[in-house]
Amino acid sequence: MCGHAIRHPPFTASLIMPSCEQPTFLLNSDVVWLDADTANTAASDAPSGLSIGELAAEFSVTTRALRFYESRGLLSPARSGGMRLYGNSDRARLALILKAKKYGFTLLEIKEMVDAQDGRAEAQSLKLSREKCSEQIDMLERQLREVEDALVELRRIHTTLAHPTAER
Amino acid sequence: MCGHAIRHPPFTASLIMPSCEQPTFLLNSDVVWLDADTANTAASDAPSGLSIGELAAEFSVTTRALRFYESRGLLSPARSGGMRLYGNSDRARLALILKAKKYGFTLLEIKEMVDAQDGRAEAQSLKLSREKCSEQIDMLERQLREVEDALVELRRIHTTLAHPTAER
DNA sequence: TTGCTCCTCACGTCACGTGAGGTGGC
DNA sequence: TTGCTCCTCACGTCACGTGAGGTGGC
């Protein structure tokens, strides 16, 4: 049980995933294999790999974040001398990580989900059980109610501040 | 700039503040002096002070949290030998801290706000400028949108999981 | 003596941010 | 030589959680 306050949400992630896209499913008991949408970036530019700075810019994250994900075993780009070289599979993996982060999963949970996909074709999907999915929905609903609550009270205070209805 | 994900919100805080209560204002340029509502706990029980365990139980926080707030200069209970003794002013201060936390302020911001109330009567109010107030509203609105977004997508996934509309 | 609460260090967690000090290619 | 990006430690931040080892009163 951890009591981290809600603050400074991941602004960046929302830029990546257009909300109109439908996830690709391969139904298999009650597990989803959530795929990253890599179609738009598949073979457009440099096919031999991106530098850490290029990938970071593409996804609006810091290079520090990419190194951190690597240290947690979530990414493992090729090396060209000392430099990291990110290929299309790394890009797809990163898209998955950020999508899962947007859904409120921790990096540890995300690691378990990507580790569980070993052996699948392309290996760029994320294992999400129905149970985990509804747990996450419950969690987000609780968060939503609390943020809404705080907003109602803060707005009431702000209104009173803006239009002092004489109290003294 | 810090990138903490939204997760594990402060469930406890919402138990303390009934949403029907109107904040007490003392208008003074564009600053609110937000007061803690201590009327209900004013002189009901033991008047000489509570132990850390008793105060923690009353507010549904851990003793560790109370010691942590003290280490950050937010609380400074009296001592009886080695033991902390919390009086009514400490209780009111804690109510303020938890209220501000609910609004999404960091402990550092809360410290600045309580420090700014030095010299006020009773010293149990919290200085909140109109500007800070609307900044906080903006922040919470961004959070709200992101949690709503994530919820929409996760619910779509869950629906598809629950009713497999034949895709194979 | 057991059980309960209290105490003070002090390290762990989470997802990175932020220098510190140095290399490589234009 | 300056400017840019890259690298590896390694410590800092935020709000606590979690033992480690010990005390005090019933």
Image (cartoon, coloured by chain):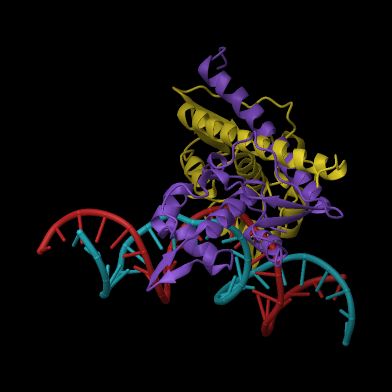
Chain colours: A yellow, B purple, C red, D cyan
Nearer to us in this view, A43 or B150: B150
Image coordinates for residue B143, horizontal then vertical, percent: 70, 41
Horizontal side, residue B96 vs residue B65: left or right: right
Residue B60 can be seen in this image: no
Residue A152 in percent (x, y) is at 71, 36
Query: Vertically, is A148 above or below A64?
Result: above
Q: For the image shown, how many numbered marks are present on the structure?
A: 0
Residue A80: x and y, percent?
65, 63
Q: Residue at 43% across / 60% down in the picture?
A: B48
Q: Quadrant of residue D6?
A: bottom right
**Quarter where residue B115 is shown:** bottom right
Q: Is residue A125 left or right of residue B45?
A: right
Residue sitting nearer the eye, A93 or B136: B136
| Residue A154 makes an appearance in the image | yes
Q: Residue at x 61, y 37 (%)?
A: A146
Give the percent coordinates (x, y) of residue B40: 54, 43
Residue closest to the eye, B104 or A70: B104
Q: Residue furthest top?
A: B165
Which residue occupies 40% across, 59% down? B51
Relative horizontal placement of residue B154, taking residue B128 as reference (left or right)? left
Residue in the picture at 56% in, 30% down: A137
